[in-house]
Amino acid sequence: MADVNQHDVVVVVCAGVVLLDLAGPIQVLNSAGSYRVRLASLDGQAVRSDTGVVLSVDCALSDVTERVDTLVVPGPPPGLLDLFPSELIAQIRRLGGAARRVTSVCTGAFLLAEAGLLAGRQATTHWLMCADLAAQFPDVAVRPDAIYVRDDQVVTSAGVTAGIDLALALVEEDCGADVARAVARHLVVFLRRPGGQSQFSVWGDVPLPRSPALRTVLDKVTAEPAADHTLAGMAARAMVSERHLTRLFRRELGITPGQYVTRVRVEAARTLLESCDVSVEAVARRCGLGSDETMRRVFLQVLGTTPTAYRQRFAY
């Protein structure tokens, strides 16, 4: 018989589940010591994860007839999202509809959405899949930069290690900040990591433009981020009017000329912060971001973190 003081957690284990999506939250909950965690597959049989590791389970989803405290739905790789049987979605709908709290990790948000558990709610998923989630489920308000999103009793998280952030938030809610902080220290992770998903995405990449004039401008900005790339100067280089250049940017890239220049400069700054130990002020000058204070403001606006914090996390 389960300890009545423990929170009952059922983790949905599906074919191809991303191992860290599953292992991260379970490790956090186990370290907190106040949770009874059960792994459940559709048929009660062992499941092979995306890494090939075979996971034994405690029961079939249909065997869970009592109301669970927390349902956790980790995600499969994107290529497997269309391969899940309707019975799995039905079980998630049944258990999630009765649970005190429903959570997902990474692409598990797609399974919650398919089950109707995200309708009218805010949610997130891996940054690579946010646009797909929003397109497939227009009744879900997708927040692409969030590490995790809490909407009433439903909590969704971004990709892979973000499941650890989500689980720490659950521990803090259930057991208090001191316990969550102790677990975070033990696992050597942030209790609340700085910034959002933007700092992990390669969103500086843009589609290849069709217009030769626009390609000329983009090549120059990319080659010399610190140059004086005013709208007038870029238009003169492309031999078009400023208005026409702005239209080209919006039509082919979906952004303004100024936004593109900022993105290229941020990408250049990120590369320098990761690969060399020059000062933040020197990086700002080299990348056309002016002063260290200006670069700090731009980083907070674009990446949700500061240059110093970014370097501490990603320098090699």
Image (cartoon, grey):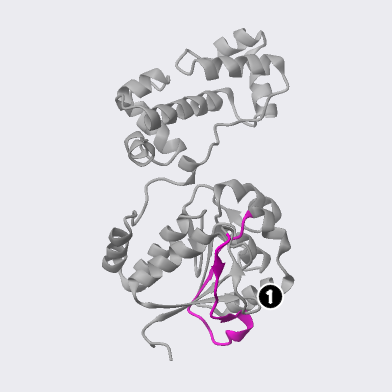
Magenta span has 314? no
Q: Residue at x 63, y 78 (%)?
A: 94
Q: Is residue 287 above or below residue 96?
A: above
Out of 271 and 143, give the one closest to the viewer.
271
SS for callout 1: helix
Q: Residue at x 54, y 37 (%)?
A: 202
Residue 137 at least partly seen: no
Residue 134 at least partly seen: yes
**For mark 1, what is the residue?**
90
Q: Residue at x 48, y 18 (%)?
A: 225
Mark 1 Cα within 10 Å, few/some/many (few <14, many 20+)? some
Task: Write the start and end of the magenta stretch as one range.
Answer: 52-77
Q: Quadrant of residue 88?
A: bottom right
Q: Amino acid at mark 1?
A: Ala
Q: Position of residue 270 (x, y in %)?
A: 43, 31
In this picture, residue 245 sits left or right of residue 203 = right
- If the image is split into quadrants, where does the N terminus sit? bottom left
Q: Position of residue 295 (x, y in %)?
A: 38, 28
Q: Quadrant of residue 110?
A: bottom right
In this picture, residue 103 sits left or right of residue 91 = left
- If the image is split into quadrants, where does the C terminus sit? top left
Out of 32 and 215, give the one closest to the viewer.
32
Out of 136 and 85, give the one closest to the viewer.
85
Q: Quadrant of residue 61?
A: bottom right
Q: Residue at x 35, y 32 (%)?
A: 296
Q: Position of residue 53 (x, y in %)?
A: 55, 63
Q: Is residue 214 above or below residue 187?
A: above
